[in-house]
Amino acid sequence: MAVQRLSDLNLQDHLGGPFTPSPAAWEDQILYFLLLDRFSDGNEAGYRDNDGNPVAGGATPMFQPADANNAVTTDADAAGWRAAGTDWLGGSLAGLQTKVGYLQRLGVTAIWISPVLKQVSFQASYHGYGTQNFLDIEPHFGTAAELRELVDTAHQHGIYVILDVVLNHSGDVFAYDPDRYWTQDPDSGRWFLDPRWDQGLYRVRGLRDPAGDPTLPFGPVDLTAHPNAWPDGAIWPAELQDPVTFTQKGRISNWDWPPEYLEGDFYGLKDIHLGAGPVDAYQPSTALVALTRCYQYWIAVGDLDGFRVDTVKHMDLGAARFFASSIHEFAQAIGKDNFYLIAEITGDRGFAYETAEVTGMDAALGLADIQDKLEWMVKGYRDPNEYFDLFRNSLLVGKDSHSWFRDKVVTSYDDHDQVRKGDAKARFCADQQLALGALALNATTLGIPCIYYGSEQGFDGHVPADNREPGKDRYIREAMFGGRFGPFRSADRHCFDEQHLLYRQLAAILAIRRQQPALRRGRQYLRDIFGDGQNFGPPRMLGGQLRSVVAWSRILADHEILAAINTDPDNPRTAWATIDHGLHAEGDTLACLYSTDSATIGTTVAVARRNGKAVQLTLPPAGVVLYH
């Protein structure tokens, strides 16, 4: 049973170890981000277990193409499928443990798991960002013992575990008693008082009981008088029940205006006051000290390897620094010298890296420019320079190394929020043909690549065409194990298919990444091409589209890997691609390590004296190649 007060927790009891050492270099890792409720319930049939053996049991069969849309054949079925997407579906820690081998064989070396701590009981906050008890595991997910069993299994298979953690806010643990801003609900027409941020405090009616009603006092809860507050009411540990834990200033409406985005609530999630003062003299609040202690406890109990820290943009820089230094010191004290803190820092590159450096966070995540430019360049609607320039040396970030970014940014193109897309949310794989190009670009360019669960199975995140509901996150959060809200508008079909073409191709590329240090640590250069028969130059859009070979090099010492994709999904493309002049002599050859045209693997191309030195590449439609 979870303890009710931090003061009753003896952290020393959990420091006996042994603990798994940190990786030497996080840029060597491949991350895989999953929403735990949407990944696996452990009841699938016909997949391979952690040792690679076929599983005989299980009730849910594997998805087949004919199963697409099997959940939306009638209006009633479609309504049920859509509604299921907002509810708990059944993914668990034990289910994820059974799929560690699936991830290992794909080439994943670090799992990033959505938050697992106990959620408010009256809402279906399956995503994990509505914490009610920071010292307990959400029962829908399992137990603390099952978290440790999962981590132990992952470590045995060479996979690290990063847990998503939240400091900025709790769940919807209290209710306001607002006195201003009458607002009309556009759906019901009902008028209500809207507690939105305006710098002033709002009155509070009380902490919420297990049913969500604010019947508990807004302050330390006497369990003798209010026995229903434990375990599903109020907020825990009890140290967080002091009203000063919360800023109490209402919800954010302008997400780009400080101090509003620093003090306001995330919709119903309640903002936590973390402290005050300048960065170098920051005074952490008692709440921040308590939360930091809670997360140190989970490092020890779970033998975790890193945290993804949610909403760092919405925290004081001093608070983020206090947390980072406290967590790093604790982890180092138990032998985790490179415990990794990945900070969600939305915004432009300069802001993100300044924030990461000032706070001591290890890497930045959430740069919309990276996701946007990667996706639309592969789809043929951005100049490649726009993506590759994000990683160039720049006075903006004050760094002079071509490879400084390799472990300072986590790169991806899909995630569970897609804030950058507004109401037009859909997974990249809505365009199946070019999906491998996006996965390959992400895996072989600078940064720590992160795969969003289901991408390797081509999940599309589409809404039924006749039931378009803009802005709904549920459609990009399909249940990989099927259940009531499976991918491709299906139900009761799982997608742990290791024979899927995307899975096999990505696994081959990630295997090469493991074998070639240059693909993990090397300098990076977008290469000029000669495709128009006239001049070398960077690939560019023509007539509003990019239908071209895009080539880049990763160089480590005297070793060069040349990678290329074809952004044309319909036609093969041939182009000369520049390579490093000093590393190659005319007449040398580069060998093909990988190609979507398997007949090309193992063949060679000759180095010619063109634009310094260059080789001629031919890529099939939407193709990918790697040469060395």
Image (cartoon, helix red, strand yellow):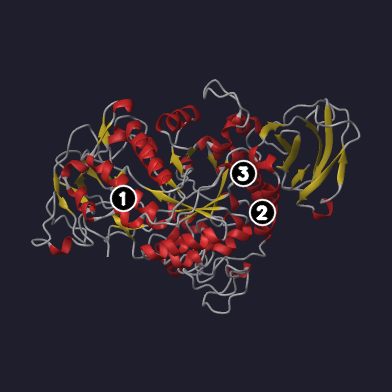
State which quarter of the image contains the C terminus: top right
Mark nearer the viewer, 2 or 1:
1
Residue labelled with disc 2: 506
| Secondary structure under the numbered disc 2 in the rendered image | helix
Question: Closest to the observer: 338 or 47?
Answer: 338
Question: Closest to the observer: 323 or 502?
Answer: 323
What crowding class fits label 1: few (fewer than 14 Cα within 10 Å), some (14-19), or many (20 or more)?
A: some
Q: Amino acid at mark 2?
A: Leu
Say if 518 sits above or below 597 in the image: above
Q: Position of residue 62 (x, y in %)?
A: 58, 71
| Secondary structure under the numbered disc 3 in the rendered image | helix
Q: Quadrant of residue 372?
A: top right
What crowding class fits label 2: few (fewer than 14 Cα within 10 Å), some (14-19), or many (20 or more)?
A: some
Q: Residue furthest front?
A: 16
Residue labelled with disc 3: 442
Q: Quadrant of residue 544?
A: top right
Q: Quadrant of residue 182?
A: top left
Residue labelled with disc 1: 294
Earlier-in-chain disc, 3 versus 2 = 3
Whether residue 533 sits left or right of residue 520 in the image: it is: right
